[in-house]
Amino acid sequence: MIQEVEGLPKKSTGRLIMGIIAIVVSVLVLLQSCTVAGLGAMVDESAATSGFAGVLVALMMLAGGIVDIATRGVKGKAGSISSIVLYGLAALMAVVFAADFSDLSIWAVVCLIFTVVDIVIMVRRK
């Protein structure tokens, strides 16, 4: 049985799970976007731009996941707010560039889900 140490904040399992899922998904987005940026650039120049935007979305998702894991035991809401902003910016960028690279709309929805789940975790946590 695990005993809590008085004075130390309780670590959030939800944020740990969110961080791990975000890191795994960001690797998938990165691989897909690098493929689009590399191979798509040979066919269409706009695909290279969208592929680069996908790489930025993946990096923001990766950063959000790392922030979720790193700040899961910290008191306060700064870590939650940081990851919410990162996921929100990633979703916004994905929506903006989804016209040329339609898979970015899927990743925008995933980022919005991560944002909403982080908001719920932040509100439920005291």
Image: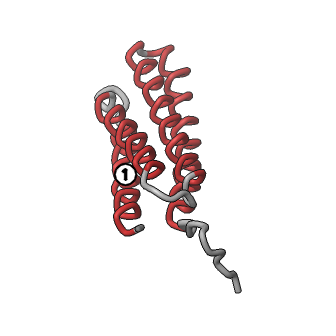
Name the residue: 70% across, 86% down. 1
Task: Quadrant for residue 72, please give it.
Answer: bottom right
Q: Single out the residue that lies furthest toward the front.
A: 7
Task: Quadrant for residue 7, please give it.
Answer: bottom right
For residue 21, side relative to residue 49 (left or right): right
Q: Which element type, helix, strand or loop, lies under badge 1?
A: helix
Q: Nearer the viewer, residue 8 or 68?
A: 8
Label 1 packing within 10 angstroms: few (<14), some (14-19), many (20+): many
For residue 15, side relative to residue 91 (left or right): right
Q: Is residue 86 above or below residue 68?
A: above
Q: Is residue 125 above or below residue 90?
A: below
Q: Quadrant of the C terminus?
A: bottom left
Reading the image, the residue beneath label 1 is 115
Q: Percent position (x, y) of residue 90?
A: 40, 37
Q: Percent position (x, y) of residue 50?
A: 40, 24
* Residue type beneath disc 1: Thr
Name the residue: 58% across, 42% down. 27
Name the residue: 49% across, 42% down. 61
Q: Is residue 15 above or below residue 28?
A: below
